[in-house]
């Protein structure tokens, strides 16, 4: 994992680190092509989703993310190419971005019918537990017709989990949720990962960065990058972005004396970019965390904003998606 | 929950079963009474004109029920079946169902069977009501021919729901399914008027109750066989079409 990502200090992050090295695949596609009339939605995709990974599929609108996921879910037929699953077809669960259910069914009945369709009936208590996991325990007996889009999305994930899937395919699972719901959803996906391989598409790169061990960047129906997130972020300089009320001259002088700050630049007045020591990033990050508050106090600087700086997934994403897809030889695969 | 129970819930909770019960039961209970009182109603509104109306016969009552059930009943069955069999009308729902089943037959067959069974059951209810009312207010009706006529009508409804299933495999929206089905059934009715086609087309079975009760119906086995074959072929075609069709794009866009 990229050194500066350790700044997130997430126990989940540490747990996901090991999975980056797995080589067995839960799902691979070979030269997957999908055309709609004259439009080529997918132009030969060779997806490789490692077993047990959380694979994030990102790309701009219209890049083909949903098309891939729907083909994997069996909702679309590919024009050409093959899909190879190492898990049984019925062990694949799909959660669409616009999940919908019969409005005259209750939430509990939706899970019951989801289990019934898979031929895996579940006791009521188990279904209630799943509703509890997705935050719908209080709405178990309510008809789905009165649910908000966010609640339907949660129920969609619940319906996905009901068959104890081994591969969960989720299309924009957090898109319709409020900020708190979004965090819960991302946490839930991270929680189920491991025994369950998760393939998730998202517009939110912060979410992807937070939970995904692997990433595929789609641009105009082609994979511009595929591999571990760590590999993608390798070589980027860890940095901290610090905004104080100007002037910041005293603070800059103090920072320049710190061993962990390899360089300090002031873009706009008060906006500092502090590059950390890349060779020992973890120690530098710890030192920065420990020293920043005393330094601010000594310099008499008023803190406005503090966050991560430097090159992030978002920057790499923009680079990949604006320069167009790389040639096949340049597509990473780890 | 099994898909069969789901389909029963669908009929009950969407109140579609009420539409079926209402149309056949109202016709079954109402038309014999209306037939009985029709001469008096007409005389009461004659305004001095002498109208000679023969007394109502049991055949008139059953014929009134059968012809109305054959038209209005078929229309309502078509609407209800279209609503039930429009599996791909809502992409979100289609994704929920289709991503969980391995073969389309597991999805289509319970829906087809449920709506067909409900249609036939409510037709039976209506026919019983018509028989009882006719017997009470006008006179006795032989139960044997009535039962045979009901069997022909029931086969006609099976055929109608198969046509709807086939249309649902061709188009997605409920409106389009209803449109395709009605155009096809109307076209059959038009062809039925040709003497060469009269004895073997499925439309011959519609209104079979009145024909059997009132007069000799002639050979029906051609029509029965053709209807049965067509119903099975339409259902098989529907399954093939459902299996080969992509689900419509969710939220109308591709990512």
Image (cartoon, coloured by chain):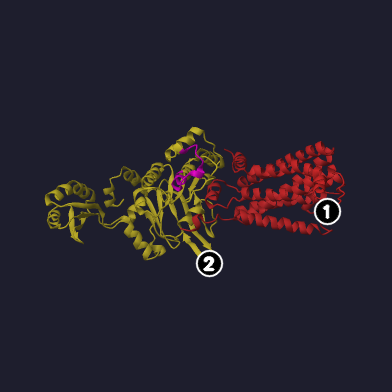
Chain colours: A yellow, B red
Q: Which mark is residue A272?
A: none
**In this orientation, does residue B252 appear?**
yes
Q: Chain of mark 2?
A: A
Task: Determine whether A61 is above or below B127 in the image.
Answer: below
Between B233 and A166, the one nearer to me in the picture: B233
- Quarter of the image for residue B193 reads bottom right
* Residues rendered magenta in the picture: A139-154
Between A119 and B250, the one nearer to me in the picture: B250
Task: Determine whether B20 is above or below A240 in the image.
Answer: above
The total of numbered circles placed on residues is 2
Mark 2: which secondary structure? loop
The residue sitting at 77% across, 52% down in the picture is B202
| Residue on which the image places disc 2 | A38
Residue B229 in picture, x, y percent from top left: 75, 50
Quadrant of image for the C terminus of chain A? bottom left
Front tag of 1 and 2? 1
In the picture, measured across the screen, residue A64 lies left or right of residue B54, that is: left
Q: Chain of mark 1?
A: B
Q: From mark 1 to mark 2, how far is it between C-alphas? A: 49 Å
Q: Are marks 1 and 2 on the same chain?
A: no
Residue A104 in picture, x, y percent from top left: 55, 42
Magenta stretch contains residue B9: no
| Residue on which the image places disc 1 | B199
């Amino acid at each position: 994992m990229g050194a500066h990502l350790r700044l997130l200090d997430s126990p989940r992050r540490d747990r996901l680190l090991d999975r980056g090295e797995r080589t067995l695949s839960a799902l691979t596609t070979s030269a997957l092509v999908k055309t709609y009339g004259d439009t080529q939605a997918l132009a030969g995709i060779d997806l490789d989703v490692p077993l047990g990974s959380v694979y994030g599929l990102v790309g701009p609108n219209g890049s083909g993310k949903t098309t891939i996921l729907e083909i994997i879910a069996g909702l679309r037929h590919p024009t050409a190419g093959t899909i190879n699953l190492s898990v049984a077809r019925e062990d694949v669960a799909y959660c669409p971005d616009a999940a919908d259910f019969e409005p005259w069914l209750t939430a509990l009945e939706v899970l019951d019918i989801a289990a019934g369709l898979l031929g895996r009936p579940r006791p009521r208590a188990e279904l209630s537990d799943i509703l509890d996991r997705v935050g719908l325990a209080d709405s178990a007996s309510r008809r789905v017709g009165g649910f908000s889009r966010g609640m339907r999305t949660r129920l969609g994930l619940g319906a996905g989990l009901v068959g104890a899937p081994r591969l969960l395919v989720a299309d924009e699972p957090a898109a319709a949720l409020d900020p708190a719901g979004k965090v819960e959803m991302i946490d839930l996906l991270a929680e189920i990962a491991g025994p369950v391989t998760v393939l998730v598409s998202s517009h939110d790169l912060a979410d992807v960065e937070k939970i995904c061990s692997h990433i595929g960047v789609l641009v105009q129906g082609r994979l511009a990058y595929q591999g571990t997130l760590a590999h993608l972020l390798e070589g980027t300089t860890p940095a901290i972005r610090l905004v104080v009320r100007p002037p910041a001259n005293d603070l800059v002088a103090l920072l320049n004396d710190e061993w962990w700050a390899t360089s300090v630049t002031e873009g706009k007045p008060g906006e500092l970019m502090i590059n950390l020591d890349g060779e020992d990033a973890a120690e530098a990050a710890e030192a920065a965390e420990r020293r920043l508050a005393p330094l601010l106090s000594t310099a008499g600087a008023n803190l406005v904003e503090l966050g991560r700086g430097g090159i992030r997934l978002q920057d790499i994403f923009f680079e990949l998606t604006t320069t167009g897809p790389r040639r096949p030889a340049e597509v990473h695969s780890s | 929950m099994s898909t069969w129970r789901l389909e029963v819930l669908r009929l009950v909770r969407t109140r579609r079963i009420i539409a079926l019960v209402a149309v056949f039961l109202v016709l079954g209970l109402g038309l014999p009474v209306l037939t009985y009182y029709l001469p008096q109603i007409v005389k009461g509104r004659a305004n001095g004109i002498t109208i000679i109306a023969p007394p109502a016969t049991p055949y008139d009552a059953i014929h009134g029920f059968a012809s109305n059930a054959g038209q209005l009943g078929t229309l309502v069955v078509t609407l209800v079946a279209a609503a039930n069999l429009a599996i791909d009308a809502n992409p979100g729902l289609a994704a929920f169902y289709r991503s969980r089943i391995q073969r389309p037959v597991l999805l289509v067959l319970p829906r087809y069977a449920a709506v067909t069974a409900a249609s036939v059951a409510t037709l039976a209810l209506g026919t019983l009501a018509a028989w009882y009312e006719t017997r009470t207010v006008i006179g006795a009706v032989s139960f044997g021919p009535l039962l045979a006529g009901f069997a022909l009508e029931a086969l006609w409804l099976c055929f109608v729901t198969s046509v709807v299933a086939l249309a649902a495999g061709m188009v997605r929206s409920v409106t389009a399914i209803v449109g395709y089905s009605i155009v096809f059934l109307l076209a059959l009715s038009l062809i039925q008027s040709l003497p060469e086609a009269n004895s073997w087309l499925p439309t011959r079975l519609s209104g079979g109750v009145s024909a059997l009760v009132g007069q000799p119906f002639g050979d029906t086995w051609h029509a029965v066989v053709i209807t049965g074959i067509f119903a099975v072929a339409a259902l098989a075609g529907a399954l093939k079409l459902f299996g080969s069709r992509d689900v419509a794009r969710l939220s109308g866009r591709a990512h």
